[in-house]
Image (cartoon, coloured by chain):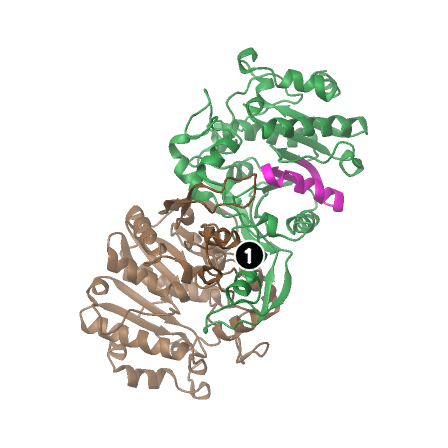
Chain colours: A brown, B green
Amino acid sequence: MARRGHRFALALTGATLLGALLAPVAARAADAIGDPGFKIVALDKKALAGPLTIARQGSFFVGGRDIQSQDLSTLPAYAAAGTITVDQMYTRFQVPATARGTSIVLIHGCCLTGKTWETTPDGRMGWDEYFVRRGFPTYVIDQSGRGRSAVDATAMNAIKTGRAKPDQLPVVFAASHESAWRIFRFGPEYPKVYEGMQFPVAAQRELWQQMVPDWLNAMPTPNPTVPALSELARQLKKTVLISHSQSGIFPFQTASLDRAGIDAIIAVEPGACPAADGDLKPYTGMPIMVLFGDYIDLSTRWAPRLKTCTEFVEKTNKAGGRAELLLLPAIGIKGNSHMLMQDANSLQIADILASWIEQRTASK
Amino acid sequence: MARRGHRFALALTGATLLGALLAPVAARAADAIGDPGFKIVALDKKALAGPLTIARQGSFFVGGRDIQSQDLSTLPAYAAAGTITVDQMYTRFQVPATARGTSIVLIHGCCLTGKTWETTPDGRMGWDEYFVRRGFPTYVIDQSGRGRSAVDATAMNAIKTGRAKPDQLPVVFAASHESAWRIFRFGPEYPKVYEGMQFPVAAQRELWQQMVPDWLNAMPTPNPTVPALSELARQLKKTVLISHSQSGIFPFQTASLDRAGIDAIIAVEPGACPAADGDLKPYTGMPIMVLFGDYIDLSTRWAPRLKTCTEFVEKTNKAGGRAELLLLPAIGIKGNSHMLMQDANSLQIADILASWIEQRTASK
């Protein structure tokens, strides 16, 4: 019944639903956690603590292509001309001793790497280990052109040696602490903090250390992470693609390319959802969850994104899909920043995701 | 007695010793593995296979500094001015359920990241897991400015917007497949293979995917990895710094900075050893092992490095140190490339390193 009711809520018009979701903080009701439409089953404390036994672990790359270049080096010790491999995607995994049939893939967002999901800035267990302890084979990637996945930096040498012009330098940006503070909704501006906000700001330095320059806008189209995710999903056979922020659109683009291997999609605060007036067929055959944290109504960046994602969820369901939108404050979970996998209640959020996967897919 | 003999060999003059070490391939003797001066104890097959139980795992950063810049972005979505953190060192670790008191730190070389030590290109267990199974808390780093450790890319935007000139672009180089083939001693030139060479060339694509542009020459002096390793060693209290190739000098520079926490140093095919005529005091108080693989005499890059490292070992011992040089062919282990942690006999080499640590330090 609750599930019905939840579906009904999502079938409201975007405007009506948003009106309810974006009610002012003061008007937010209930201390008890409300019903998200599925049963939230917490991982018990015994499973969370103590030694962890894994069946196997390792890392590998997916995708990539060889290119020839004359601009590999300006140093005599390394030849300027030759072949390099670019666009590949680094993937690290752990498979627990007692593993479910469905695996998960954790896909980080802007200006970050797979480190996003590991130990939190204040030293608590990351989602990477949580999901292994919950029984899921867990795959953490570095997007193509980020972290351990190489960028193509040859343009730098072409410009350094005068073979190309400075305006041909790739677009590479870094998010400042001050920008990230607002974008991640820690507060209205650096260093002010929203009341009740759950990111461990005392450990913020460890977050700043995680941030890397972002070559996203210098990558080919489609972003090579998308076909690489597709290849990974085919290898894994039954997997849930879990995105965050800037990578939010990637699992949808992957499903649009090829549904093979994708069991479900979870978009954690996606930077974009597919257009509600576009072709929604690729998304109707699988469970989809779009999740947002708190303070959305206070952010000119995130409020419109919630709106378009709400419309996407609604239209996908009208087209016969099984999409759900979960706004955490609507079920009484308050204070979550954009970095909710690192917030003080990160494992509570993980419980929600894992419960949803267990109940919506054939993961058991 | 064997140990004495080994020490004696190292006390030969550099020229005499090198003459013996660099004897032509055809003249290499013995099929049985010779005596390296300590007992090689293989990790038994039971410990190598089956589930792995770890007490704890995670990741964190060491070091880094905040800089202000006007050149963070050329995109409207991200402010051009603000603060970012650079020079930090990413560190991932696993502590086995039954852990020794001495930990190890694995420090990768040029154009690579911590991936070096993980699953081999042909899918076998990496040294990262081997050492955990052997009982060592194991720490794998990405050098500052490589992999998950951010580079400072602000100069790119300064040049793109005309605030700086193209020749101020940082020196960033990529090693081509063809260069790496020779440097890693897979063969005399791409794609020729030395007879008996142990790198799994059929899986070479997975090695090319591991390679990343190298900002080494764009880093401040001393390389921020060095003070970061020092801070890490102090945190770990008793650790063995294991370098490879380009990072070979880093553990020595770290010991020179501060000996605290450093139990021993292993230099796997170091790109450089400390100068034999320099101050050797920082190195006399700890066990040091310098290890080289095969085909050194065929490489104009590596033969001189073996020579200077041999002189370093000899002079360090004359100054009262406990340094050892192990040339694998000299004990009958043949065919090792520069990437010996990925060679077909990689776990045999790991047995040698682990045995040496166990017998030379108070690790038990």
For the image, the number of numbered tags is 1
- Residue at the spot 73% in from the left edge and 30% down from the top edge: B312
Vertical placement of residue B103 versus B144, above or below: above
Task: Give left or right: position of A147 versus B314.
Answer: left
Neighbourhood count class around disc 1 (C-alpha, 10 Å): few under 14, some 14–19, many 20 upward: many
**Residue type, mark 1 in image:** Ala
Q: Is residue B304 magenta?
A: no
| Residue A43, percent from left and from top | 43, 59
Task: Give left or right: position of B264 versus B184.
Answer: right
Q: Is residue A97 visible?
A: no
Vertical placement of residue B353 versus A153, above or below: above
- Residue at the spot 42% in from the left edge and 53% down from the top edge: A141
Task: Give left or right: position of B272 versus B214.
Answer: right
Q: Quadrant of residue A303?
A: bottom left
| Residue A327, percent from left and from top | 38, 75
The residue identified by callout 1 is B150
| Residue A76, percent from left and from top | 56, 40
| Residue B201, percent from left and from top | 41, 30
Task: Give left or right: position of B152 versus B237.
Answer: left
- Residue at the spot 34% in from the left edge and 61% down from the top edge: A250
Q: Quadrant of residue A13?
A: bottom left
Vertical placement of residue A243 versus B235, above or below: below
Q: Quadrant of the N terminus of chain A?
A: bottom left
Element at label 1:
loop
Q: Which residues are magenta?
A: B239-265
The chain under label 1 reads B
- Residue at the spot 47% in from the left edge and 33% down from the top edge: B181
